[in-house]
Image (cartoon, helix red, strand yellow):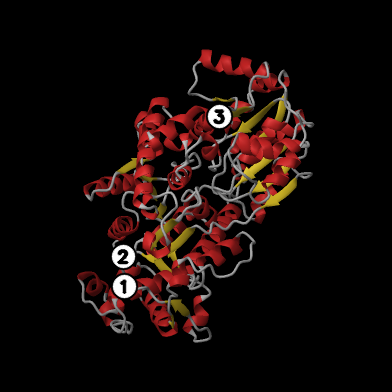
C-alpha cells in the first residue's frame, strides 16, 4: 500500500534505487509532486531528472503516466525499473495487440507503478478513456522542450498535451527538460498550462565535460587523431549533418580501426535498431549519426561527443554534447568548425519553409552559436550565459587551458571586404583568397581579376589564415553568403564602418595544429575505468564487466541496465566481503542485492 507522505522518500531512494542521498533540488521536487503540486524541472542530462517522477510514482496512489518521445528511451527506462523491482511498462508500436491489451488491463487494475507512452498515443480518444477508468498518480512530460515551436526539437503532438490539465485537473504534472532558454521555458509554461507550477532550475553546468572547438582543417583526420589519442576503445557519438556524410565517415573510421557504425533515418529500420542495440550493449562502439540518433540515448558511459558539422543552435549543441558523461566521469565535447559550416547553416535557414519571423529567430540562435565558436573566452561561461546562468572561467575547456591569441585584424578585414566588393560580390571565399594572394588561375584571368587593385594585396597571410578571416567576417556580421549565387559572399550594412576605418576588428587567431595529451593524462581517468585502479582491482573490474556483458545478453537489455560502470568500479575498488558490505555500494538497492549479490561475491572471492 502506497502512502502519500514524504518520510518514505529517503527510505525508497536507498532501498529501491540504491542511492544514499538526494542530489540538488531532487528532494524538493519529489515533495512538490508527491503532495499534489505541479512542477517544471530544468536539469542537465545526467542530473537525475527521472528520479524526480519515478520516486513520487512510488509514493502516490495509482499509476504514473510518463510521456516520452522515443521508443528506445521507454524500453531502456522500463528495463532499468524492472531491475529495481518497480512495476513498469510501456505502450508503443513494438507491442502486438495481445501485449498491448495486457498492459492496458494492468493499468486499469492498478497493477503498474509507471507506464510510458508516446504523446501521439496518449492523445487517442481510446487511451484518454482508459485513463479516466484508471487511477492516475501523476503525469510526467519528459523532453518538454519539444513543445516549443522555437526549439531545436519541436514536435507538434506535444502541443496537445494541455488536454491533460483540462481533463485531469486534480492530477499533478511534472514537465522536465535538460535544454530550455528563457523564451522556451515561458512557452512550455504557457502551452502546457503550468502557470501554477513551481519552476526548478538546476545549474546547466556539466563540469565533467570538456568543451573543445577546433578550426576545421582536414576534419576527418582531426577526428581520427582525437579518437585515437584521447578515446581509444571508448564509446562515443560523432554527429554529421547529412546521411551521406554519416555513411562515408563511419566506413572510413572502420578502415582506420575504429569500431564505427552509421545511424540515420534513411537506413533500414531493422539495421538501425541493430546498430543502436550494439551501441547500448557493447563497450567501445562509436556511432556516426545524424541528429536522428537523439533523445533516446540513455547510455551513461559515452566518453565523447564529436561534431563534424555545426549544429543549428546552442540548445542543439548543449543537448547533443550532453549525451557524453552522463555517469559524471570525465568526457569530451569536440567540434571542428569552418566557414563552410556557417554558409551551410545560413543556407538551410534561408531555404526553410518558415516565415520571416521564424527565420529571424533561427538566425539569432545561429549567431549565438557562432559567438560561442569564435569566442576567445571560456566556453563554459559563454554557454551558461546563454541559458541565463552566471559563472566564472572553468579551467577545463580549450580556451581556459590554452588561451587563444587575438590579433588586430582590421587591415585584413578591410582587404577582404574590399576584395568582395571589387569582384562584384559574386564569388566565394576560395576565389577571393586566390585574388588576395595573387594567384593567376584560369578563372581569375578569365574574369580579369588579376587587373584589380586588390589582386595580390594579401600575400602577407597564408591561405588558412585568410579562410579564418572570411569565416569570422561572416560570424561577426560583416559579410553574408548569397545562397542563390552558390554561397558568394556579399557585404552587409555593418561592413561600411570597417571599410571607412571607423571600426576596429579583433579576431581570434587560428590555433596551430597540435597533438593533445590523452584525456586520461590531462585530468585523471574516469573512476569507472581500470586505468585508475590498482592491478588486482583493475582485474576485478574487467571480470565484473565480462560477467555483466553475459548477464545483459541473457536478459536482452543494455549492460548499464544491470549496473553502471561507476557501480562496478566501486565494487572492484571496495572489494566487499559480505552482502552487507555490498549493499553500501551506490547503485545497489534491495532488489539488485537480492538478485545479483551472491553471484558478485562469488565472482570476487570464489
Residue in the foreground of this view, choosing between 145 and 587:
587
User: Which SS class for mark 1?
Assistant: helix
Is 189 displayed left or right of 274 in the figure? right
Q: CA distance from mark 2 to mark 3?
A: 52 Å
Is 51 displayed left or right of 74 in the figure? right
The answer to whether the residues at label 1 and label 2 have Cβ atoms under 8 Å apart is: yes
Q: Callout 1: 10 Å neighbours few (<14), some, many (20+)?
A: few
Residue at coordinates 35% horizontally, 37% vertically from top-left? 546
Q: Position of residue 61 (x, y in %)?
A: 73, 26
Residue at coordinates 66% horizontally, 35% vertically from top-left? 12
Farthest-out residue, top: 98
Instruction: Name the residue that disc number 1 marks.
Output: 464
Task: Say whether disc 1 or disc 2 marks the residue closer to the N-terminus.
Answer: 2
Task: Say whether disc 2 or disc 3 marks the residue closer to the N-terminus.
Answer: 2
Residue in the foreground of this view, choosing between 279 and 252:
279
User: Which SS class for mark 2?
Assistant: loop
Residue at coordinates 22% horizontally, 74% vertically from top-left? 445
Q: Position of residue 274 (x, y in %)?
A: 36, 32
Q: CA distance from mark 3 to mark 1?
A: 59 Å
In the picture, residue 163 is in which quadrant? top right
> Does 513 sit above or below residue 188?
below
Instruction: Name the residue that disc number 2 marks.
Output: 217
Task: Say whether disc 3 or disc 1 marks the residue closer to the N-terminus.
Answer: 1
Instruction: Name the residue that disc number 3 marks.
Output: 591
Amino acid at each position: 500500500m502506497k502512502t502519500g507522505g514524504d518520510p518514505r522518500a529517503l527510505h525508497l531512494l536507498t532501498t529501491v534505487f540504491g542511492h544514499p542521498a538526494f542530489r540538488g533540488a531532487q528532494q524538493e521536487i519529489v515533495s512538490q509532486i508527491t503532495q499534489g503540486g505541479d512542477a517544471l524541472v530544468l536539469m542537465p542530462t545526467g542530473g537525475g531528472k527521472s528520479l524526480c517522477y519515478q520516486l513520487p510514482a512510488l509514493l502516490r496512489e495509482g499509476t504514473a503516466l510518463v510521456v516520452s518521445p522515443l521508443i528506445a528511451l521507454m524500453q531502456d527506462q522500463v528495463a532499468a525499473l524492472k531491475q529495481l523491482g518497480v512495476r513498469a511498462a510501456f505502450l508503443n508500436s513494438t507491442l502486438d495487440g495481445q501485449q498491448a491489451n495486457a498492459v492496458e488491463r494492468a493499468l486499469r487494475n492498478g497493477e503498474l507503478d509507471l507506464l510510458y507512452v508516446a504523446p501521439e498515443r496518449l492523445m487517442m480518444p481510446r487511451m484518454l478513456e482508459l485513463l479516466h477508468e484508471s487511477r492516475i498518480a501523476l503525469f510526467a512530460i519528459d523532453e518538454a522542450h519539444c513543445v516549443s515551436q522555437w526549439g531545436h526539437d519541436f514536435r507538434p503532438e506535444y502541443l496537445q498535451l494541455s488536454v491533460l490539465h483540462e481533463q485531469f485537473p486534480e492530477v499533478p504534472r511534472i514537465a522536465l527538460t535538460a535544454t530550455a532558454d528563457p523564451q522556451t521555458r515561458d512557452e512550455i509554461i504557457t502551452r502546457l498550462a503550468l502557470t501554477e507550477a513551481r519552476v526548478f532550475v538546476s545549474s546547466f553546468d556539466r563540469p565533467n565535460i570538456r568543451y573543445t572547438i577546433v578550426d576545421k582543417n582536414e576534419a576527418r583526420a582531426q577526428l581520427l587523431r582525437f579518437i585515437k589519442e584521447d578515446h581509444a576503445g571508448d564509446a562515443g557519438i560523432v554527429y554529421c549533418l547529412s546521411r551521406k556524410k554519416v555513411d562515408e565517415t563511419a566506413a572510413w573510421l572502420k578502415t582506420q580501426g575504429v569500431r564505427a557504425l552509421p545511424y540515420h533515418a534513411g537506413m533500414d529500420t531493422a539495421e538501425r535498431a541493430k546498430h543502436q542495440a550494439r551501441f547500448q550493449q557493447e563497450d567501445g562502439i562509436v556511432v556516426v549519426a545524424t541528429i536522428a540518433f537523439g533523445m533516446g540515448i540513455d547510455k551513461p558511459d559515452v566518453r565523447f561527443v564529436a561534431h563534424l558539422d555545426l549544429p543549428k543552435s546552442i540548445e542543439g549543441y548543449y543537448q547533443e554534447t550532453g549525451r557524453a558523461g552522463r555517469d559524471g566521469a570525465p568526457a569530451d565535447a569536440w567540434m571542428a568548425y569552418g566557414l563552410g559550416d556557417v554558409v551551410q547553416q545560413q543556407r538551410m535557414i534561408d531555404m526553410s519553409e518558415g516565415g520571416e519571423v521564424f527565420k529571424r529567430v533561427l538566425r539569432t540562435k545561429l549567431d549565438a552559436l557562432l559567438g560561442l565558436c569564435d569566442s576567445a573566452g571560456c566556453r563554459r561561461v559563454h554557454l551558461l550565459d546563454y541559458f541565463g546562468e552566471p559563472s566564472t572561467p572553468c579551467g577545463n575547456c580549450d580556451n581556459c587551458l590554452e588561451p587563444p591569441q587575438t590579433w588586430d585584424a582590421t587591415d585584413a578585414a578591410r582587404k577582404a571586404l574590399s576584395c568582395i566588393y571589387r569582384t562584384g560580390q559574386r564569388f566565394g571565399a576560395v576565389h577571393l583568397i586566390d585574388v588576395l594572394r595573387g594567384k593567376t588561375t584560369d578563372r581569375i584571368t578569365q574574369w580579369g581579376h588579376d587587373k584589380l587593385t586588390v589582386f595580390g594585396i594579401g600575400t602577407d597571410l597564408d591561405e588558412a589564415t585568410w579562410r579564418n578571416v572570411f569565416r569570422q567576417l561572416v560570424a561577426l556580421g560583416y559579410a553574408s553568403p548569397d545562397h542563390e549565387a552558390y554561397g558568394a559572399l556579399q557585404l552587409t550594412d555593418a561592413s561600411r564602418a570597417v571599410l571607412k576605418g571607423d571600426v576596429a576588428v579583433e579576431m581570434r587567431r587560428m590555433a596551430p595544429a597540435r597533438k593533445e595529451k590523452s584525456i586520461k593524462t590531462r585530468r585523471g581517468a574516469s573512476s569507472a575505468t581500470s586505468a585508475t585502479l590498482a592491478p588486482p582491482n583493475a582485474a576485478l573490474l574487467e571480470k565484473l564487466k565480462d560477467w555483466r556483458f553475459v548477464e545483459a545478453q541473457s536478459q536482452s537489455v543494455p549492460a548499464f541496465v544491470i549496473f553502471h560502470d561507476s557501480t562496478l568500479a566501486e565494487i572492484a575498488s571496495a572489494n566487499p566481503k559480505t552482502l552487507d558490505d555490498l549493499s553500501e555500494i551506490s547503485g545497489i538497492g534491495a532488489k539488485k542485492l537480492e538478485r545479483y549479490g551472491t553471484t558478485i561475491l562469488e565472482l570476487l572471492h570464489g
